Amino acid sequence: MSVIPESELIINSRGAVYHLDVKPEELAPTVITVGDPDRVEQISKHFDSVEVKRQHREFITHTGFIGKKRISVVSTGIGPDNIDIVLNELDALANIDFASRTIKPELTSLQIFRIGTSGSLQAHIEVDSFVAGTHGIGIDNLLHYYRHENNDEEKLLLREFNAHTQLEGRLSPYIASAATSLLKKFVTGYHNGITVTCPGFYGPQGRILRLGLANPELINRLTEFEYGNHRISNFEMETSAIYGLGKLLGHQCLSLNVIVANRVTKKFTKDGALAVQNLITNTLEIIAQ
């Protein structure tokens, strides 16, 4: 089996992976990712015990227990580029032998949950409500750096999405699905729909401050998209990258978002901190079961 060079997998002086500064034994099989570094402690304060606390740059990791359930919480920062770092390093921690720098003969499938904030693209999905993403459609370019294939449903959805939005040619959207084994646990109290992932917060999400937009109808086209029972529920900046890389690496992933802005009704949450805390509490209750 080939040895992974030092330049490709960087391991620091304490034997931890470079960006996360986490050792393999410090990572739990259930992982929660959050964009905001401050949100890590907002989650780990609910743990019965915390055994590991690590921080390097914007990447903070706490590992601990709720009852007998071992969980790690990792901050990713914002955007698909950071997800590329975090997902690859989480997989390395689980599936690469750091001593020999070789891939383990038996691979581990992590359960990876994103807890985040998002903008609704449907009037009926109101602020402070929860969304579990059935699919992630990326209008960034991350997954195109990796060899990937879609199943028949994903191919149909992506074809219809491209035809409706007319983004293909200007962009190269990609699609990946949530883990159905996790999604089925988040039905009651959750809207289910497609989550679109954008490479930015302003222009890529149709916001106008001082710059004009190359695609001013983007919001309307996303809101109006419909194929069978599939609608676009929300958009944010991480889900498709998590789903895409997670699927390629053999992990089970689910993105859970609380709506802080409704881009159709133009409403914004009155208490974002409370909205996020409600999602955290609900998610931990389900995960810990």
Image: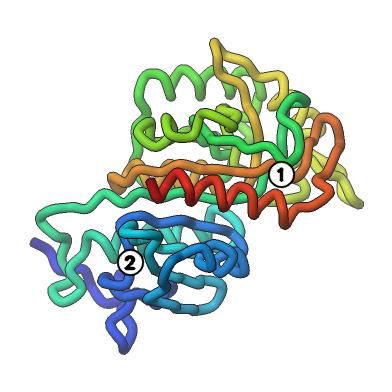
Secondary element under disc 1, as helix, strand or loop, is helix
Amino acid at the residue labelled 2 = Leu
Q: Relative to 177, is 254 above or below?
A: below
Residue that numbered label 1 is attached to: 204
Q: Position of residue 120 (x, y in %)?
A: 71, 35
Query: Which sits in the foreground, 167 or 27?
Result: 27
Secondary element under disc 2, as helix, strand or loop, is loop
Q: Position of residue 274 (x, y in %)?
A: 72, 53
Is residue 187 in sight in this rendering?
yes
Badge 1 density bin: few <14, some 14–19, many ≥20, Cα 10 Å: some
Q: Name the residue rendered at 54%, 29% in the picture.
A: 188
Q: Name the residue rendered at 43%, 73% in the picture.
A: 19
Tell which tag, 1 or 2, sits nearer the viewer.
Answer: 2
Q: Name the residue rendered at 21%, 68% in the picture.
A: 4
Q: Are marks 1 and 2 in contact (CB under 8 Å)?
A: no
Q: Name the residue rendered at 55%, 39% in the picture.
A: 138
Residue that numbered label 2 is attached to: 27
Amino acid at the residue labelled 1 = Pro
Question: Which residue is farthest right?
Answer: 210
Question: Which residue is farthest top?
Answer: 228
Q: Relative to 54, is 224 above or below?
A: above
* Earlier-in-chain disc, 1 versus 2: 2
Q: Is residue 202 left or right of residue 185?
A: right
Is residue 144 in sight in this rendering?
no
Q: Which quarter of the figure has residue 65?
A: bottom left
Query: Which sits in the foreground, 98 or 7?
Result: 98
Q: Is residue 218 left or right of residue 145?
A: right
Q: Position of residue 30 (x, y in %)?
A: 35, 55
Distance CA(mark 1)–CA(mark 2)? 34 Å
Question: Which residue is farthest bottom?
Answer: 13
